Amino acid sequence: MVLLLLLLLFSASVSAMPEDEFGRLRNDIFSVSNQSYIAGIEKIDAALQQHRYQLTLEQQIRLLYSKAIYQHRTNQTQAALVTLHQCKLLSEESAEQSILYSYHNILAGIFADFGLYEQALQHYAQAVEKASFLSNPLYARQTENNIALILTELSQYDEAQHYLARFYQFGVETDNVSVQAVALNNQAELTLKQGNISLANELYQRALVLRQQHNLTHELSFSFLGLAKVARATANWLQCADYARQSLLLRQDRNRLDLLEPGLLLVEAQLALQQWLDAQVQLDKLIPLADELRQFDALQQSWQLQANLFEKTGQYSKVSEAWRNSLAAYAQLTEQRFAITVAQNSTELGLLLRNKEISALQQQHIIQQVKNKSLQQQLWGGSAAALIIILLILWFSWILRRKNHLLAANLATLKQTQTQLVEAEKQASLSSLVVGMAHQLNTPLGNCLTAISSSLELQGNLQAKLDNKSLSAKELSAGLQQDQQLLQLAQNNINKAASLVDRYKQIVAQTQESQPQQFDIKTLLQQQLPVLLLGLQPDNPLQLEITGDHYALLSYPSLINQVLSALLENALLHGDMPAGSARVSVKIVAQTSGVRLLFSDNGKGISEDVAKRIFDPMFSTRLGQGHLGLGLNMVFNIMQKLHGSVQWQPQDTAGCTFVLFLPQHIRQTDSSSIN
């Protein structure tokens, strides 16, 4: 990072590349990439090296954005995520408010390509916000068009139609025929998904006519592809095959990735028309192409069509193998989606940790400046006193210098010790978090492996029966249905693992108040505990009792709410309180320096062996059952931040009691430690 900053400072002293010259450079790159994305990547790397002293920071970022796009399209998606991460780091040094527009737009496109539509929608929404800083409104409308495509996939048709109508109207107002045609094509796609085939055909035809009238030849393939889908919906297979061939023909000189969708549609039509030989020739092209490009969704569909062809031509011995290859492609697709999700979440987690460390360093710098200013004021006061009694101030100055020397030495030692303790605490906390995360992820990933193993075993049994010619159609159907259920189980567990990664990421990004507030603790308990209980939705009714006197505190009520919520949730989940008579009580005991809260339930209580570890991170008596073991650890950490304490109090009878102490005032100088 230091080398990067030095490079940027040095480049600032060299004349920056004019925008028109940079535009010509980008056009050269686009021209090369239209023939080969790999060549486009090499061209960008060469440009960054050759013009590293002339390119501005924003120009470098824009070239890296193009590189990330080409990396994704050449199956280097994880490398693309690294490049985007580099762009985001560089953008922190830029004053251009719209610089992250392409970051969110490209990232959303990557998620959409892998069927991760919720993540794609989040980043497209952030891209729209950044587009508001751009002078050309086309970027915002294009991003809204992309949002409409995602909403269509999520079956949110009304909202998608709203965005597409705005996109089309923008094309009309700006006389942009290409935008009008794209909007009509996408409206047709939405309408076709809703089942209105005639309207979809009309919209596709309107888009086709516009493109033909204005010689938009490179866009015609999308119109023909859409019309092929309409023909498929009406079972007009001859027309479907004809439109699919026209779409393929127009895409021959483009990147090979664009050949997959019309190619699959053509095979489907050829199978319906019983053109077995033509279908096999097309599949022999599609399967290796999808495999080479790691397009596992297209590969799965190709093998399904191949299995269908084998079955229709009586090659029953090959049907099972084709289905096995289809299932293997689906497993690879699922693994690919999971890897991309984990990689992006890890990148965002790293950024959060980095920003948090930078914030801490900035706070330390501000504190040091205040100390230096205070010391300077003391020295000026000493100089003024020296004018009155020189001899006395000289003597005091000697004493002060001696004490300051000792104090500085002690302070340096104290800071070094404090730094070592903080680092040790961070390493211990990180180790516990990593071990706990691995334990949590082990269950869903283990279930996924079990499901896939069972799927392979089931396929083996079906293959054996098929080879022995003892496999009936009913057994084959039941086997395929069971196999689909196993794959769905694997998908659910992978989604659960991804959800766990999101929850760990959220732990790092907790928000906090900046200033303490004056409030009454009993009023807070009376107002917040019923609300917290309502949000937890217990299965059995629970009685709340709050006793004790009113007591005023200067503290952080939102953090205290988190403590109460965690303790209440702990009692409901682990207390095993009797049904119909469950009770939680909070007793307020006022003291001179603060207030003591006795939080009790009438459950089964906690054994002394378990009590020794209840405040440790990742410890839970129900670990692996949806519980992360972070609740009481969070309580302990928050109470430390509030300069208070929490202890478990042994009980002679059944039940569990936690004793919390909160100081009456948190000093204003302590508020920085809360953050």
Image (cartoon, rainbow, N blue to C red):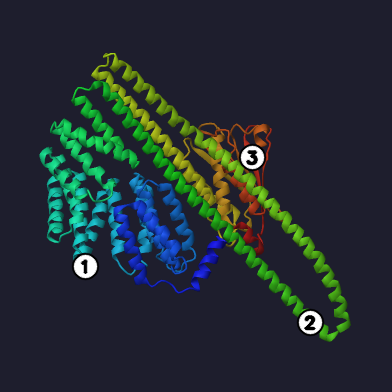
Residue 636 rendering spot, x and y as whole percentages: 63, 46
Side (left or right) of 612 relative to 401? left
Look at the image and tell me whether residue 590 can be seen: no
Residue 284 rendering spot, x and y as whole percentages: 25, 35
At 63% from the left and 38% from the top, the residue drawn is 614
Q: CA distance from mark 2 to mark 1?
A: 73 Å
Q: Earlier in the sequence, mark 2 or mark 3?
A: 2
Q: Are marks 2 and 3 in contact (CB under 8 Å)?
A: no
Residue under numbered circle 3 = 657
Q: Nearer the viewer, residue 215 or 194?
A: 215
Q: CA distance from mark 2 to mark 3?
A: 59 Å
Tag 2: amino acid:
Ser
Q: Which mark is residue 581?
A: none
Residue 288 rendering spot, x and y as whole percentages: 30, 37
At 22% from the left and 29% from the top, the residue drawn is 308
Which SS class for mark 3?
strand
Residue under numbered circle 1 = 174
Screen quadrant of the C terminus = bottom right
Q: Earlier in the sequence, mark 3 or mark 1?
A: 1
Residue under numbered circle 2 = 383
Side (left or right) of 50 relative to 157? right
Q: Nearer the viewer, mark 3 or mark 1?
A: 1
Tag 3: amino acid:
Thr
Q: CA distance from mark 3 to mark 1?
A: 69 Å
- Label 1 crowding class (10 Å Cα cut-off): few <14, some 14-19, many 20+? few
